[in-house]
Image (cartoon, rainbow, N blue to C red):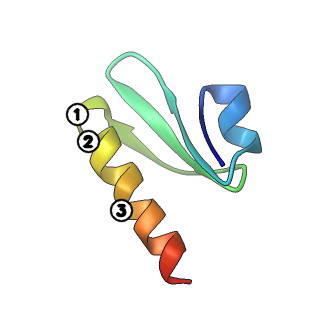
Amino acid sequence: MLLIGPGEAQEADIGIAGGKGEGLLFKKGQIIRKIKQEDMVQELKKEIKRMLKV
């Protein structure tokens, strides 16, 4: 499941809670890292690919 928003991201397998110029990448309810706005899509795709390899 992929959802975007602070509350939804905490419930998701993976998600981003976006803010002004940056966002938090969540995985299974845990904050993984803070990322710049311009890197959000690329970083989300990388993390999804990592999850699929498992």
Instruction: Tell me if residue 35 comes above or below residue 4 in the rendering.
Output: below
Residue 46: mark: 3
Badges 3 and 1: C-beta atoms under 8 Å apart? Answer: no
Residue lying at the far top of the rendered structure: 20
Q: Give the quadrant of residue 5.
A: top right
SS assignment at label 1 = helix
Residue 27: x, y in percent?
62, 55
Quadrant of residue 46 within the rendered picture: bottom left
The residue tagged 2 is 39
User: Mark 2 or mark 3, which is nearer the start of the sequence?
Assistant: 2
Q: Label 3, secondary structure: give it.
A: helix
- Mark number displayed over residue 49: none
Q: Amino acid at mark 1?
A: Glu
Q: Nearer the viewer, mark 3 or mark 2?
A: 3
Label 3 crowd (10 A; few <14 / some 14-19 / many >=20) = few
Identity of the residue drawn at 65% across and 38% down = 9
Horizontal and vertical percent position of residue 33:
47, 50
Q: Which residue is identified by label 1?
A: 38
Q: Position of residue 2 (x, y in %)?
A: 59, 44
Q: Amino acid at mark 3?
A: Lys
Q: Amino acid at mark 2?
A: Asp
Seen at 37% across and 28% down, the residue is: 22
- Quick check: marks 1 and 2 in contact, CB under 8 Å? yes
Is 51 above or below relative to 42? below
